[in-house]
Image (cartoon, helix red, strand yellow):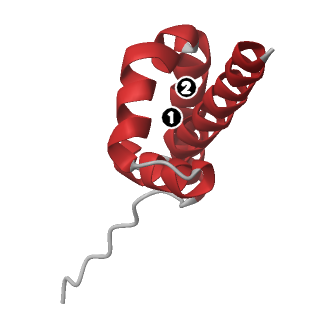
Amino acid sequence: MRQRNNEMLLHENDAILAGIVLKHIRQGSYELKAFSEAAERLGSSISACSFRWNCVVRAEHEEAIDAAKAERLQQRNSMRNKSGSLILISNRG
């Protein structure tokens, strides 16, 4: 019973870690900031979150990572298009 509870907690923590890292990927933030946020939320260390992400969780979320990166690029391109085109002003006198 105790092992089952530990496994459930581990899966919950992995889901929280994944959610935080994917959010930071979408926002164009650094992984270190994601690990710092996850460590604070999970009561763990930044290095433990980094290790868990890189050794276990990342492989389980490759499609979500690709989707988050695509979303970030789409947002970035959308912001560039909304900023308008370059206007050249000539001071020929």
For the residue pair 86 and 78, the one nearer the viewer reads as: 78
Mark 1 lies on a secondary structure that is helix
Q: Are there few (<14), some (14-19), or many (20+) residues within 10 Å of tag 2?
A: some
Of the residues shown, which amino acid type is indicated by label 2? Ala
Q: Residue at horizontal 32%, vertical 42%?
A: 47
User: Looking at the image, is 55 positioned above or below residue 22?
Assistant: above
Q: Residue farthest to the bottom?
A: 93
Q: Dividing the image into 4 quarters, which one contains the C terminus?
A: bottom left
Residue 76's spot in the image, x, y percent?
Answer: 51, 45
Left-right relation of 27 to 53: right
Left-right relation of 85 to 17: left
Any mark on residue 73, and which? 1
User: Looking at the image, is 15 positioned above or below residue 57?
Assistant: below
Any mark on residue 70, and which? 2
Mark 2 lies on a secondary structure that is helix
In the rendered structure, are the residues bearing label 2 and label 1 in contact, judged by CB atoms less than 8 Å apart? Answer: yes
Residue 3 falls in which quadrant of the image? top right
Q: Are there few (<14), some (14-19), or many (20+) residues within 10 Å of tag 1?
A: some
Residue 60's spot in the image, x, y percent?
Answer: 56, 10
Q: Dividing the image into 4 quarters, which one contains the N terminus?
A: top right
